[in-house]
Amino acid sequence: MNQNKEDKMCIRNGITILSDICLPGKNTTREEIDKLISICEKKGWTEGMLYYYRNNPGRDDRVNNLVNRKGFDWKMIVPLGPESVVLDASCGKAHNSISLSESCKTVFAVDLDEDKLIINKFRFEQEGIKNIQLFKADVTSLPLYFTENQFDFILMSGVLEHVATNKKCENPYLTQLETLKGIYYILKNNGYFYLGIENRFAYHHFLGKMSHGDIPFTTIMPRFIANTVNKLIRGKPYTKYIYSYNGYMKILKQAGFHDIKIFLVMDYSTP
């Protein structure tokens, strides 16, 4: 842990708070979140999830993703051992963290959404998982919180394309690059980094089927056109940059990474 940040951190609801940033509200109301947390606390994580999905029709597929650990056996390609220390950068519902916890000493599960972290804590308690530590922190500023060469393995799945969304920046590429540089800084010299992200020129993007709720075809448009279209239709710039093979090779090399291998899979979350 970075000593300067350690002096300022606090523990709240079992979560180590390293950032005061608050995420903007999404589709779920504060009342619904508080109800979910209350159920998790009183009846357990499973009952809380059942309540959530009963009240969010059409998202039943997510239940399987949450409980099916075998779906994340990609971890077997990384040589983790009993002394390995892992960072799950923007852990979300922590299914990756749980899967990895079975093969290493400690997982640092980081996210800016404090509510998700609290719910994850209830799941860990229910399942008897004791080697995952929860941190509220901004993945774009990891060197502020952690030390150089600290982690054996760092995972960032479905995150890099979003890091500029809530940032006031003119160039999302630079925000993404600085995020990757921060990851490289805290990764051990012989460590591994897993990046799960979409292919900019995937065939379904040419059919108008966009990821992340983007306006159809903006992913494959030149950036300045996508930016103009997004401003005209949604009143904000286009920030969810994803890349082609060459684009990923370029940005990863600029961040300092070498011995880069890119795999084409149908779903990067379950390779």
Image (cartoon, rainbow, N blue to C red):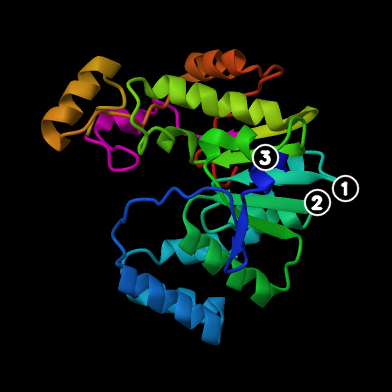
- Distance of mark 2 from mark 3, alpha carbons? 27 Å
Mark 1 is surrounded, within 10 Å at the Cα level, by few (under 14), some (14 to 19) or many (20 or more) other residues, namely few
Q: Secondary structure at mark 1?
A: loop
Q: Amino acid at mark 1?
A: Glu
* Residue bearing the label numbered 2: 104
* Residue bearing the label numbered 1: 83
| Magenta stretch holds residue 44 | no
Q: Amino acid at mark 3?
A: Asn
Q: Residue at x 54, y 41 (%)?
A: 157
- Distance of mark 2 from mark 1, alpha carbons? 6 Å
Query: Over which residues does the magenta segment extend?
Result: 195-215
Check residue 4 in the rendering and tell me which mark sits there, or answer none. 3
Residue 59 appears in which quarter of the rendering?
Answer: bottom left
Residue 8 appears in the rendering: yes
Q: Earlier in the sequence, mark 2 or mark 3?
A: 3
Q: Residue at x 48, y 26 (%)?
A: 176
